Image (cartoon, grey):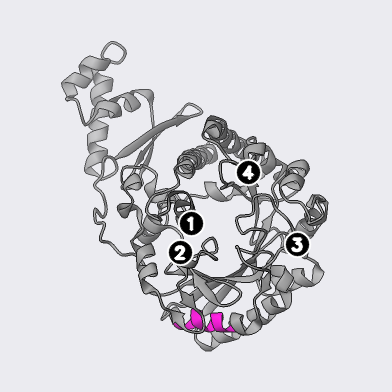
Amino acid sequence: MIHKFTIDQINIVLDVNSGALHVVDDLTMLVLEDYLSLSIEDILNKHRDIYSEQEITGVCDEINELRKEGLLFSEDPLQNNDYLPGEGVVKALCLHLAHDCNMRCRYCFAGQGKFGGSSDLMPLNVGKKAMEFLIKSSGSRRNIEVDFFGGEPLMNFKVLQDLVYYGEGLASANGKIIKFTVTTNGLLLNKEVEDFLNCHDISTVLSLDGRPDLHNYMRPMPNGEGSYKYVLPNFQRFVNSRHQEDYYIRGTYTHHNLDFSKDIFHLAGLGFNSLSIEPVVAESGKDYALQEEDLPVIEREYEILAQGLLEYARKGNNISFFHFNIDLDGGPCLAKRLTGCSAGYEYLAVAPNGDIYPCHQFVGRKNFLLGNVFDGISKKEIAIDFRRAHVYNKPECMDCWAKFYCSGGCHANAEAFNGTIYKPYDLACKLARKRIECALYYNIKKGLDNSQ
């Protein structure tokens, strides 16, 4: 399987199974269209009015050589839907420190932080038990991770501090290295919090949607006031305090800002250089929900974003855009390419009461309750189901050229829209395919620019 596309007059060919990328001329694009279905003689007859026989046979010879090397039309590396990824150990936990929030974001998938339940903060004893569960469940794996999430996790900052101290000590005593991450809306990101996060090298995800009016509309305070003027100074001070390292500004684009590249460049203009913006996931009845008819605009916007980021780079201002960070040489291991985030078996979420779910987006969906940190995993069949939900077990993924980049998409979105983790959310697939094309183009073009 190959995938051919053109952006900014650059013809790119991806060999899906090997991951090999080729920048080719127009003739090669034409020949590849018929290479497997027509004979060399038929290909010559089809194109001899425009190209010479020498040019056409030269292209065919080059394709033949690349095919022999396994760089074009390569064989599937697995061809086995019985493959079961994962090592049988838990590598990371997402701890819901707060099922409560001090914002009222319109698109919040967590129901203003309550995840379909009541306001709640994780007690220290539950968090400690979760840390012990992670140590025990991680087996011989040395590197483990804990994400602090919510709601707004900084509403439970004292417990966060105590869990970092406890986790560091527990990991050290068991010969492990623990890495922490926190996702915050920034309202409580004061100097005390800043110093603690920096002292313990805690990675941060900072929620900021972009331009002030857009951010204020989508991310208001409980009283309806906009939050931009409160969080922006906190984010700028915090990012400067850690010298622009180990953070991401994470935004969301909706039907109201289909021109989201402007939000990225607005954030870049504020001095942030590690950026991400995600498509909103929402019911079609919501005014901010993305619609099928938005696709052409969004697809063009990703191209505008890629070309704009290249202009930034040419001026010496490198912006790290999360979804364009693709390793063209090695890339992730096979298991990651087939399953992505490993939710449900290697990555789990823990609610404030200690209940365990496949990931933060499944919290509160009782039919996905795996167990509790005090008693362990009781429904191992759910974990097995998530291990089996890789691209070879998803019919829509099997013939998709992007499967080894998107890894089958988000399980939670698939289940929410289709009632099963085995059928990807179609709109998200279309967005991902275009985003991946632009990521490949961006990296190839950046390499070409650097070589000149």
| Kind of residue indicated by mark 2 | Ala
Q: In front of the other: label 4 or label 3?
A: 3
Q: From which residue to which does the magenta span run?
A: 128-136
Query: Where does label 3 land, which residue?
Result: 102
Q: At x 47% / y 84%, what residue is drawn? A: 375
| Kind of residue indicated by mark 3 | Asn
Residue 99's disc is: none
Q: CA distance from mark 4 to mark 1?
A: 19 Å
Residue 425 percent location from the top left of the image: 45, 46
Quarter-of-image position of residue 90: bottom left
Residue 142 percent location from the top left of the image: 46, 78
Q: CA distance from mark 1 to mark 3?
A: 25 Å
Query: Where does label 2 land, which residue?
Result: 343
N-terminal label among 4 and 1? 4
Q: Nearer the viewer, residue 161 or 5?
A: 161
Query: Where does label 1 land, which residue?
Result: 412
